[in-house]
Amino acid sequence: MMKLQKSLIAVSLLAALTACSDDNNTPAPEVCGADNCTKFTILHTNDNHGRFWENGYGEYGMAARKTLVDQIRDEVERDGGYSLLLSGGDINTGVPESDLQDAKPDFIGMNMIGYDAMAVGNHEFDNPLDVLENQRDWADFPMLAANIYDADGERYFQPYKIFTLGDLRIAVVGLTTEDTVKIGNPNYISELTFTDPKEELKKVIAEIEESKSADLVFATTHMGHYANGDHASNAPGDVALARAMQEGQLAAVIGGHSQNPVCMSADGNSYDADFAPGSNCKPDQQNGTWIMQAHEWGKYVGRADFEYFGGQLHLASYKLMPVNLAVYDGYSPAKDDQGNIIRVAEEIKPDSFVKETLRPYQEAGQEKLDVVIGSTDLTFVGGDRSVVRARQAAIGQLLISAQRTHPQINADFGIMNGGGIRADIAAGDISYRHVLKVQPFGNVVSRAAMKGSELTSYLASLATIEGAGKNGGYAHFSNIEMTVNCGEKSVEIEKINGENYDATKEYTFSIPDFSAAGGDGYPKIDVINTGLVDADILRNYVETNSPLSWADYEPQGEVEYVNNDSGYTGGCGAAPAE
């Protein structure tokens, strides 16, 4: 492939040198023409997370996405070009209507829209592998992941697919974040191995070059975009991937996972602080590789118009096209004098066939979700990461209380990772919908036992975990009193279950199986698998104990953090950005 590109570049240079644009023999620059150029458009979305249906304000949704994609495809075809539609992964998890139906409506919608390929996201492993296999069967397009291997050492997914666009052959390689080992459910991925995407891509490119099977290599990834490669506690993402390749080997990365619109500032080292829906978006470019990501949920369809001529790829234009996004006045959509929601761009009419096909799935989900199961006097904040990943919170106490007091668990105290808390429980009536939004992953709650002497070391590793205050590993504790020394990475336990701590006594505690199996970087421990799903436990607890009083769950300093150099008192590590 590289030899072919060099040859084409040499030919184009020779042609340019022999052409004159004026009497001074100035070479005429080559431009895209009818006979020397292939035009193609890459359309992309990522991090769908169950949003097959529009929200309450008519924003996004697959029916409107279908209309927009069809319009763009028609326009590109009329102009003599070609198009591909790619997804950066994470189709699963986030909306109960989808979660309860294993994301089947999402895959049906993607088929109707006409996706050509998708990267495998870490949330594709929120369900047992038999569910993932069903999803693979439902999809009329390949799930791509070159860096996931099964127990026999074979790739679990197709690594790449080659698309022919006129005279141009494009290889699309799929890659998945290494962090899946840490943030995926260990019980579902224990038979799989996730290798370094950078090294795996090098292998695939070498294979493609040797076989001369493609002219360009694109990657559709679920790795995350971190400006200037600053990935902090996350696994290296798309920037590191591009920098690890030889310049010219990787044309573009169509990404996902970090769920941000990749629109860069002029210097290319930070995000455009002025980007707003409908405004200009400059994608990142690293080591000659374009990097693009379209935020999340189908809020945008990314559109990259490419031209290939003279042996080189040129980005003619790039847009993030909003899908019925509203203009907001504070926290609510702005409305015109007739009470209609004002949109960022011209409203897109949802495709009627897609909408009617998906409607039965939406209605089936609604029937299961809207039954009132209890109530609360005040809001339990769970959707704000600066709360649940930064300090002991009432919602953490509520979830742990439900788990540790369940008759089949009946533990002395409990532990809950902040990353497993996903939404608020608003004041007023509580429905099953609220429960599933708070705990959408379907984790089984386990029961563990340890002697006090072992427990001290284990709790120290959780309470002082690196990055606490920013990532999902932040641990909530209930029915235990202790002091956490961040500097010494130790804990001093005072009381458990209302009684003085005893190093010789055996204590029991509840913990999500995700955490017990090593998720979020927790030490792996032996547990009793109760078979009880967290959302079902919470539903039963709410039904039994309503009306809930927020004050009964608000922490009163039972867990105290000391000796933190940053001065932050909510946990170990720097305070999260507000």
Image: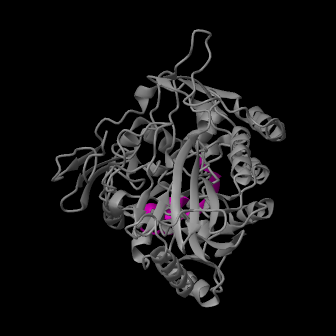
Q: Residue 207's spot in the image, x, y percent?
A: 59, 87
- Tell me the quarter of the picture where residue 555 sits: top left
154 horizontally vs 362: left or right: left
Could you tell me which residue is drawn at 49 percent across and 70 percent down?
178
Most foreground residue, 265 or 173: 265
Is 428 rendered above or below residue 413? above
38 horizontally vs 397: left or right: right
Could you tell me which residue is drawn at 53 percent across and 55 percent down?
316
**Is 57 in the magenta?**
no
345 horizontally vs 107: left or right: left
Is 409 rendered above or below residue 451? above
Q: Quadrant of the C terminus?
A: top left
Q: Residue 413's spot in the image, x, y percent?
A: 43, 50
Residue 232: tell me if it is visible: no
Residue 5: tell me if it is visible: yes
Q: Magenta stretch?
A: 513-534
Q: Residue 327's spot in the image, x, y percent?
A: 51, 26
Q: Quadrant of the N terminus?
A: bottom right
Is 561 rendered above or below residue 306? above
- Tell me the quarter of the picture where residue 457 sits: bottom left
Q: How many numbered discs sit on the rendered protein?
A: 0
Most foreground residue, 331 or 163: 163
**Is 521 in the magenta?**
yes
Could you tell me which residue is drawn at 31 percent across and 58 percent down?
502
